[in-house]
Structure formats: structure tokens, C-alpha cells
């Protein structure tokens, strides 16, 4: 087999979408390309995901994020920073570096898993101020 006979097996040039059809979307469930591939960014992808959400669900999500960031995360950070643990149990350099990320994730999960009255109050206030007051129903299923 030589180059002049045209019998050389060449691998076809494939794009990432052609190699794995349907995988370009989030979780492989959509035919849309990922925000990384298109360069659209996180904010537009987030708005696309939340497009089908009701106003109550959007208000509840915003209220949960607010309570987690403004109320719960500072308490967790203060507890972590105030640790007087001895040498083998003291936080290492990586725990110190990534501690705020851990605090943020724990705060989000704690607020989502709990039924804080303040979350309901903030969500109701958001709906009232947006002109769409509706009865607050727990949308977490």
C-alpha cells in the first residue's frame, strides 16, 4: 500500500460532536452545544436552565442562595477560622485555601435541606416586590 495507489487508510477528521453525538449538550440530553464550546458562558446557560421555572421557584432559589451566602456561610467560616485544633488535627494549607469553597457548598446544601422560615419570608418579599405575590409553596418536592 503506497500513497500513490490511494489505498492508505486514513482516519476521518471528526469534530467532538461527531465523535459523540448528543454528548455536546448538558448531560448528553440535549442537542445544544455546551457553553464552553460556544463561549456563551455560565450566565446564559443558567438562564436557559431556569427558563421553564415558575416565578415562585425562581424566588425560592434566589432566597435560598441569599440566605446561604449572607447568613449561613459567615457562621460556617467563623467556626472554621476559630478552630484551635492541635497539630495533627489543625487545618493544612489546602484546607485553608479551599475552606471558603467548602463553606459555600455546605451553606447551600444546609439551606436547601432545611425549612428555614427566613427563606420563605425572603421569597415572599421578592414576589411581593416584583408585583407577583403568590402563596408560597415548598417547591422542593
Image: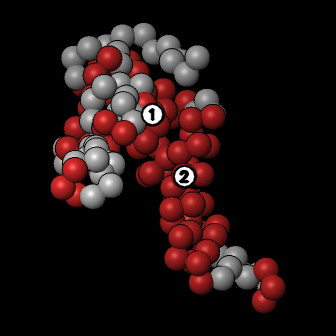
Q: Residue at x 31, y 36 (%)?
A: 18
Tell me which residue sits at (51%, 18%) in the image.
139
Between disc 1 and disc 2, the foreground one is: 1
Query: Residue 112: image x %, image y %?
Result: 56, 35
Is residue 134 visible to us here? Answer: yes
Against 58, is 3 above or below? below
Label annotation for residue 137: none
- Near mark 1 (Cα within 10 A), the count class, few <14, some 14-19 or many ≥20, is few
Of 5 and 83, the residue lying toward us:
5
Distance between the alpha carbons at the discs numbered 1 and 2: 21 Å
For image coordinates 22% across by 58% down, the residue present is 3
Q: Residues within 10 Å of mark 2 (few under 14, many from 20)?
A: few
**Residue 141, how many percent across, how many down?**
58, 17
Query: Where is the N terminus found, in terms of image quarters?
Result: bottom left
Q: What residue is disc 1 on?
A: 27
Coloration of the structure image: secondary structure
Is residue 111 shown left or right of residue 5?
right
Whether tag 1 and tag 2 are in contact, CB under 8 A, the answer is: no
Q: Is residue 51 left or right of residue 98?
A: left
**Residue on which the image places disc 2:** 105
Number of labelled discs? 2
Counting from the top left corner in percent of width and height, residue 49 is at 33, 28
Above or below — where is 4 with respect to 111? Answer: below
Q: Is residue 95 left or right of residue 35?
A: right
Q: Earlier in the sequence, mark 1 or mark 2?
A: 1
Camera-side residue of 7 and 136: 7
Q: Secondary structure at mark 2?
A: helix
Q: State the SS at label 1.
A: helix
- Tell me if residue 123 can be seen: no
What residue sits 42% from the left and 25% below the top?
A: 29
Amino acid at each position: 500500500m503506497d500513497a500513490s495507489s490511494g489505498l492508505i487508510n486514513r482516519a476521518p477528521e471528526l469534530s467532538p460532536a461527531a465523535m459523540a453525538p448528543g454528548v455536546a449538550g448538558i448531560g448528553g440530553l440535549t442537542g445544544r452545544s455546551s457553553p464552553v464550546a460556544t463561549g456563551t458562558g455560565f450566565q446564559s446557560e443558567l438562564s436557559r436552565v431556569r427558563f421553564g421555572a415558575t416565578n415562585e421557584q425562581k424566588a425560592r432559589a434566589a432566597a435560598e442562595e441569599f440566605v446561604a451566602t449572607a447568613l449561613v456561610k459567615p457562621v460556617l467560616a467563623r467556626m472554621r477560622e476559630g478552630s484551635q485544633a492541635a497539630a495533627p488535627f489543625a487545618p493544612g494549607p489546602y484546607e485553608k485555601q479551599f475552606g471558603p469553597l467548602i463553606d459555600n457548598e455546605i451553606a447551600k446544601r444546609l439551606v436547601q435541606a432545611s425549612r428555614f422560615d427566613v427563606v420563605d419570608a425572603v421569597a415572599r418579599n421578592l414576589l411581593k416586590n416584583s408585583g407577583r405575590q403568590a402563596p408560597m409553596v415548598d417547591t422542593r418536592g
